Amino acid sequence: MPAVVVVGTQWGDEGKGQVTDYLAKQADVVVRYQGGPNAGHTVVVDGEKFELHLVPSGILSGKTCVIGNGVVIDPEILVQEIERLKKSGLDVSCLKVSSRAHLIMPYHRLLDALQEESKGPRKIGTTLKGVGPAYMDKAARTGIRVQDLLEPEEFKEKLGMNLKDKNRIFQYFYGREPMNEEEIARTYLSLGEYLRPFVCDTAVLINDAINQGKRVLFEGAQGTLLDLDHGTYPYVTSSHPVAGGACIGAGIGPNKIDKVVGVVKAYTSRVGDGPFPTEIHDETSSWIREKGREYGTTTGRPRRIGWLDTVMVRYASILSGITGIAITGMGVLAGLSSVKVCVAYRHRGKEIREFPASLSVLNECEPVYRELAGWPELGDRGNVPESYDALHPNAKKYLEFVSEATGLPLVLVSTGRERKSTLEVRRVF
Ligand code: IMP
């Protein structure tokens, strides 16, 4: 089974980093296909913490790592990340960057902030990394790509055209100072020279790898409910975290995907604004936030917390054709006397089982919960159990319940941030 896509089934921060880090060890190639530095994976290897925003976590296992054409790249962040990895003694020569990927420019970051500010109470709560404006320029066909960084004259011409428009917006619409073209050109072209050895046609590389029977792991960023088409629009990101995003964002045919692993956190979190039916505001939510260190990797914002919502996970399952689930965050819930799982919504007295498109309906939905017994700790080594069988019986009941409620087989359980805390229940590769 050579090609596997890992997707988040909630609003991001499901623990995809741990799952992809685990599966990357079995893979030959690891690919990011959408999003940008708005994503953040924290992976702990032998006590050393790595926070990755653009580079796939497979870099920690020495695998060929690809940043696909569907990703928007802030070259300053990418270069910083490469330097940080090099300082830890990691080999980064196996990193490949798509020449077709679009760039996040300094004016995208400023626009992101200004657009958010002007939305007032209807703001999205973006990560302010310039992701939305970069995808806007891509769709408007005015974007600047990695390839342009390697062709200085082309880059300067495109920058000049873009900046003329953007500076007009900054000056006359927002009353801001214009941005300096030469300064941006100098900085970006030198970053381009740094990145030159990493740049290639990654679609060719990935397809060759699949055709040679190599194991390729596609690492989704964000989560299904943040998908531009399928998420809680407009409170979404500007790309496609669903599995289909891998076809466009990496350049592979849909028939190349063999399995799709949906990552489900044992509870739900959301950073940013928008509806959240199972959100809780009590001592338990504060306790979960602190224990699970639920603060944004990219922005440091406290995440909103709620119970697991299987209506949402079932929706994510159909959108991505999920073939198995990886449940994370079980160690965080350990210690609660009971835990709740939402199995349906009640709207104006009627039970609904499908995820509604209307945000006003979603805002009015009340979760229908099943309450299950909690677990004191997960196994014989605290929250790092040796095997699935060693898990506390109540934890196993919870996992089985989620598997049944979503109709999806359990493939992995991850109990913490350490590599050793991921258990494989069924083979993925
Ligand atoms: P943007 O992607 O920065 O434009 O933000 C759009 C929405 O997606 C906001 O609600 C963000 O908080 C959310 N978001 C973007 N990336 C992530 C992520 O990696 N984890 C969780 N939420 C994210």
Image (tube, rainbow, N blue to C red):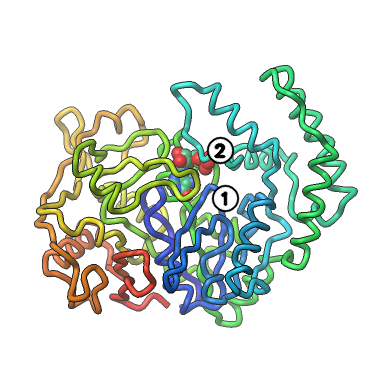
- The reply to whether residue 142 is in sight is yes
Residue 337 versus residue 112 in the image, above or below: below
Q: Which mark is residue 345?
A: none
Q: Residues within 10 Å of mark 2 (few under 14, many from 20)?
A: many
User: Looking at the picture, which amino acid does disc 2 mark?
Assistant: Leu
Q: Which residue is mark 2?
A: 128
Instruction: Report whether 326 appears left or right of 257.
Output: left
Residue 318: name its quadrant: bottom left
- The reply to whether residue 229 is in sight is no
Residue 110: name its quadrant: top right
Looking at the rendered structure, the number of numbered marks drawn on it comes to: 2
Of 6 and 296, nearer the camera is: 296
Q: Which residue is mark 1?
A: 37
Q: Secondary structure at mark 1?
A: loop
User: Considering only order in the chain, which callout, 2 or 1, is on the residue closer to the N terminus?
Assistant: 1
For image coordinates 62% across by 71% down, the residue present is 206
Residue 328, x across and y down, in percent: 31, 61
Residue 28, x across and y down, in percent: 55, 78
Q: Secondary structure at mark 2?
A: loop
For image coordinates 47% across by 58% down, the residue present is 41
Instruction: Report whether 282 appears left or right of 234.
Output: left
Asked if disc 2 is less than 8 Å from ligand 1, the answer is yes
Residue 25 versus residue 375 in the image, above or below: below
In the picture as drawn, the residue positioned furthest to the right comes out as 153
